[in-house]
Amino acid sequence: MSRWFTFAILGVLVVVLGAMSWVVERAGKPDPPKTPTAQESEARQKAMNERMKQEQASRAKMMQSIKSSAEARKKGGKLPINRTAPEPPKPAKGKLPAGALDVTGDWFKNRKPGDAGLEELEKQNAEEPPAPQQQPKPAPAVRPK
């Protein structure tokens, strides 16, 4: 009798395995792609043509700006990187507010080396009062629980 139970269980398992493989095979297949209609293909073609025209126009504009900047460089002029940006303010020669850092490209040319330069900076800072700084706000009072 145990042989019959074994064969019955094996039969049920084979049937379940077959059903599962059929379901998985059907679920794994994607739907076939739809063939585009004539209107869809025309719309896609028009959109692609418009995009190509826009890219060509932007390339032509970029090439024109590259050529104009190259011509300006040949003539000796300099074009700013961002033409719409305002010019950076130029600091007055040798004058910075007290406590400010000199971050210009040639700061080392204007300073004396070593202790002499430090003494000069200390004299300049002693002549000008330091820039006012805002007082930090106190932390809010919290009652202990």
Image (cartoon, rainbow, N blue to C red):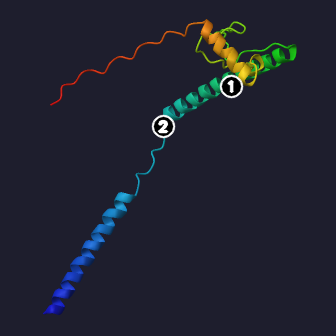
Picture coordinates of residue 123, whole percent (x, y): 65, 11
**Mark 2: which secondary structure?**
loop
Rounded to the nearest whole Å, what is the CA distance between mark 2 and mark 1? Answer: 29 Å
Residue 53's spot in the image, x, y percent?
A: 65, 24
Image spot of residue 99 (x, y percent): 58, 15
| Amino acid type assigned to the residue bearing label 2 in the image | Thr
**The C terminus appears in which quarter of the rendering?**
top left
Quadrant of residue 55 in the image? top right
Taking the spot 73% from the left edge, 20% from the top edge, the residue there is 116
Q: Nearer the viewer, mark 2 or mark 1?
A: 1
Could you tell whether 132 is left or right of 111 in the image?
left
Q: Nearer the viewer, residue 30 or 111?
A: 111
- Would you name the residue on which mark 2 appears? 37
Residue 89, how many percent across, how many down?
65, 9
Task: Decide if residue 125 is on the left or right side of residue 8.
Answer: right
Q: Are marks 2 and 1 in contact (CB under 8 Å)?
A: no
Q: How many marks?
A: 2
Quadrant of the rendered structure where residue 94 is?
Answer: top right
Q: Is 16 on the left or on the right of 75, as rendered?
A: left
Task: Tell me what residue is drawn at x 24 percent, y 77 percent.
Answer: 13
Q: Amino acid at mark 1?
A: Gln
The residue closer to the viewer here, 124 or 88, is: 124
Check disc 1 and report the residue beneath it. 56
Q: Residue at x 45, y 45 (%)?
A: 34
Q: Evaluate whether residue 84 shows in this view.
A: no
